[in-house]
Image (tube, grey):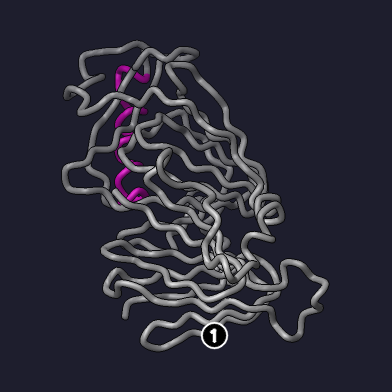
């Protein structure tokens, strides 16, 4: 079975040199689901457009996600500990600062899907330059397109020119209202009673249908059967004391204080998870049992 468990804090420490310029990012998982951590500072004036959704979480420090919402610029500040799900087909430009790290989760593109790197005339939403492409690897595919703009006549003059638009846009940006980021720990505290009632045996939805195609679900104490079907599954064990058994045809045992991520292959249709309070933990600690954040992204 193709699966992997990662201690996030240890992994970040081992790869810390990748989260500062000029690299600023490192991919943890890159199959059907792509999960990469991003540091800073960066300097970006390009906007990205894609047909899938993106899930953001700020591990350390804050970031600003510049977007075009219904034709108007908007800055969405994602603070440390907050999550945000960006809908598909929204022009966005992540702005990251020094000594910050966050992760972004997105899905692989279908062969028929296109991404776009887009630039606007300064202080406006008039399109200056754009390139449509099929994205396979964000780290490899984006830099040449950004460099193409920086060496272009359109960049030098600041006005659209003959090479601004090489093809007709395959689709237009979505006209949608964007939600605010939410503090994940506050969400867990608010819903902890719901997650610890094993008899309900149901997760709490953080994001999902009908507003989104991405399902982000919060699981608490108990045993859960999670169906993967043809999609990969990423399980995130939140920071805190916990014991957790992941049962496939074999099982993992995860113990500790740090956050962990597990990516399961799409080759198995389902598996069960057993989450329970560690006997070493005081029963007065309300979040002593394992919180599990399960996220899978469909097309």
Q: Which residue lies furthest to the front in this view?
A: 199
The answer to whether 14 is drawn above or below residue 168 in the figure is below
**Residue found at x 36% / y 67%:** 227
Left or right: residue 88 versus residue 179 is: left
Q: Locate residue 190, reporting x and y percent.
A: 70, 52
Q: Which residue is drawn at 40% across and 29% down?
A: 91
Residue 141: give x, y in percent of width and height: 30, 46
Label 1 residue SS: strand
User: Can you see residue 63?
Assistant: no
Does the segment drawn in magenta span residue 61? no
Which residue shows up at 43% across the image and 16% down it?
Answer: 71
In depth, the one of 41 and 10 nearer the eye is 10
The residue segment tinted magenta is 137-155
**Pointer 1: what residue?**
253
Nearest to the observer: residue 186 or residue 199: 199
Left or right relative to 105: residue 237: right
In the rendered structure, the answer to whether residue 213 lies left or right of residue 289 reads: left
| 47 with respect to 102 (left or right) | left
User: Is any part of residue 168 visible from this angle?
Assistant: yes
């Amino acid at each position: 079975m193709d699966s992997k468990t990662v201690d996030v804090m240890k992994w970040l420490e081992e790869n810390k040199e990748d989260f500062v310029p000029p690299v600023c990012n490192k991919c943890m998982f890159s199959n059907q689901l792509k999960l990469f951590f991003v540091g800073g500072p960066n300097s970006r004036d390009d906007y990205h457009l894609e047909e899938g959704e993106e899930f953001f979480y700020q591990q350390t420090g804050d970031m600003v996600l510049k977007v075009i919402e219904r034709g108007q610029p908007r800055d969405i500040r994602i603070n440390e500990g907050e999550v945000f799900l960006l809908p598909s087909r929204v022009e966005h430009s992540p702005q990251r600062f020094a000594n910050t790290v966050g992760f972004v989760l997105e899905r692989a593109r279908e062969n028929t899907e296109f991404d776009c790197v887009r630039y606007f005339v300064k202080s406006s939403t008039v399109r200056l330059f754009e390139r449509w492409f099929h994205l396979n690897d964000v780290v490899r595919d984006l830099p040449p397109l950004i460099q193409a703009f920086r060496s272009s006549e359109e960049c030098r003059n600041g006005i659209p020119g003959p090479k601004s638009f090489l093809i007709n846009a395959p689709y237009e940006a979505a006209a949608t209202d964007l939600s605010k980021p939410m503090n994940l720990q506050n969400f867990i505290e608010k819903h902890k009673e719901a997650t610890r009632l094993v008899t309900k045996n149901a997760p709490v939805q953080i994001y999902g249908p009908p507003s989104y195609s991405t399902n982000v679900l919060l699981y608490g104490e108990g045993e859960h059967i999670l169906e993967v079907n043809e999609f990969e599954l990423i399980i995130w064990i939140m920071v805190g004391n916990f014991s957790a058994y992941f049962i496939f045809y074999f099982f993992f045992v995860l113990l500790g204080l740090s956050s962990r991520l597990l990516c399961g292959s799409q080759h198995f249709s389902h598996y069960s998870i057993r989450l329970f309070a560690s006997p070493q933990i005081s029963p007065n600690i309300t979040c002593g049992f394992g919180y599990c954040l399960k996220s899978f992204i469909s097309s």
